Image (cartoon, grey):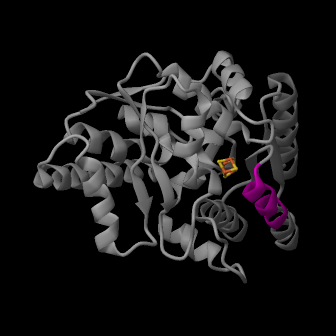
């Protein structure tokens, strides 16, 4: 049995940490999270990963190594599908295999399978199967999973009040709005909320008197409804959410402009970028800026671009 389980503060951590940590603690594990992303972690991940991997996966590798001496096992779920008729990005399907290939000296990799395309019975069998790594008590596993789902629901409700994942997890209250501009930020949570890889984008916008709304702050049913306007459904659930948020802002005109944060070398993101830019043009030209992040992103260059975008939005408003 694993006493201490390490959870990398990267990739789907921003989406599911309350579910995962509550579940693991309910099973009797002590959960330890890797530290905040640093330049050293990115360098480590970059040296361990193939060149053509996207930055978020390289960052994830850096977090795995950070946990190496802090945990008995590492939690790297195989998130195949989170809804019927859609998949997650192929990197998430193979993440435990990628993790095992990173460094042979890492602790054991725990890789529960989450696959909503399976029947309900098979889905829960996979969870029970994983739970037996910690306990033979099936009732305890079911209770732990139920507690995890409840924690996740509370967390998502807090995000919808306008909190970022870190604020929601820390139990903070929503910052008062009332900025002179409002910008929608779309993209994967690991690109938007990781302070290092996003170069503190949200914090900087707040300092410039800009209110920020993100994909996670919109209710799931709004995202689904808006993404449903696409003539052809996207294969990837998380990209559907991004598209849903941008379509919502374009249709409701509830923001002054949109920043789409995407990763270099991300196949799904490059497809979605084209789609969003053409939709923004078609809808009458709400300003949309695509911001590509990679391991070479420089803070000065990014700040200049975002500052120019914000200035342009202010000028438009006047
Ligand atoms: S969606 Fe893109 S950025 Fe995210 S893990 Fe997949 S390839 Fe990387």
Location of residue 43 in the rendering, given as x and y in whole percent from the top left corner: 71, 20
Residue 301 vs residue 294: left or right? right
Residue 281 vs residue 83: left or right? right
Q: Majority secondary structure of the magenta segment?
A: helix
Location of residue 273 in the rendering, given as x and y in whole percent from the top left corner: 80, 58
| Quadrant containing the N terminus in the rendered view | top left
Name the residue rendered at 29%, 64% in the picture. 124
Q: Is 144 in front, or is 285?
A: 144
Report which quarter residue 113 is drawn in: bottom left
Depicted 198 relative to depicted 132: above or below = above
Is residue 29 at least partly visible in the picture? yes
Residue 91 vs residue 104: left or right? right
Name the residue rendered at 35%, 35% in the picture. 171
Location of residue 186 in the rendering, given as x and y in whole percent from the top left corner: 67, 52
Q: Is 22 in front, or is 229?
A: 22
Q: Would residue 273 be counted in the magenta stretch?
A: yes
Report which quarter residue 133 is drawn in: top left
Over which residues does the magenta segment extend? 266-276
Name the residue rendered at 34%, 55% in the picture. 153
Depicted 290 relative to depicted 222: above or below = above
Is residue 209 at least partly visible in the picture? no
Residue furthest bottom as drawn: 231
Report which quarter residue 270 is drawn in: bottom right
Name the residue rendered at 39%, 36% in the picture. 169
Q: Is 254 in front, or is 47?
A: 47
């Amino acid at each position: 049995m694993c006493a201490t389980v390490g959870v990398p503060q990267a990739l789907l951590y921003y989406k599911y940490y309350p579910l995962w940590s509550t579940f693991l603690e309910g099973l009797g594990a002590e959960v330890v999270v890797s530290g905040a992303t640093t330049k050293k972690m990115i360098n480590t991940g970059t040296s361990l990963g193939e060149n053509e991997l996207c930055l978020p996966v390289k960052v994830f590798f850096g977090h795995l190594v950070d946990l190496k001496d802090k945990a008995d096992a590492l939690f790297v779920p195989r998130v195949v599908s989170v809804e019927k008729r859609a998949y997650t990005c192929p990197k998430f399907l193979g993440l435990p295999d990628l993790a095992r290939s990173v460094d042979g000296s890492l602790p054991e990799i725990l890789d529960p399978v989450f696959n909503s395309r399976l029947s309900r019975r098979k889905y829960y069998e996979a969870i029970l199967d994983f739970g037996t790594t910690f306990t033979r008590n099936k009732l305890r596993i079911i209770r732990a999973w139920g507690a995890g789902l409840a924690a996740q629901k509370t967390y998502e409700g807090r995000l919808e009040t306008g909190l970022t994942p870190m604020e929601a997890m820390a139990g903070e209250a929503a910052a008062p709005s009332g900025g002179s501009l409002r910008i929608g930020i779309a993209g994967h949570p690991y690109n938007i909320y990781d302070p290092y890889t996003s170069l503190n984008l949200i914090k900087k916008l707040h300092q410039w008197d800009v209110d920020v709304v993100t994909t996670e702050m919109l209710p799931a049913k709004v995202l689904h409804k808006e993404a449903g306007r696409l003539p052809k459904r996207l294969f990837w659930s998380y990209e559907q959410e991004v598209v849903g948020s941008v379509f919502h802002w374009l249709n409701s005109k509830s923001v002054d402009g949109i920043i789409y944060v995407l990763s270099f070398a991300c196949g799904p993101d490059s497809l979605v970028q084209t789609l969003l830019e053409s939709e923004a043009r078609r809808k009458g030209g709400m300003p949309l800026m695509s911001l590509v992040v990679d391991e070479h992103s420089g803070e000065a260059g990014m700040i200049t671009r975002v500052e120019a975008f914000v200035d342009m939005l202010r000028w438009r408003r006047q």
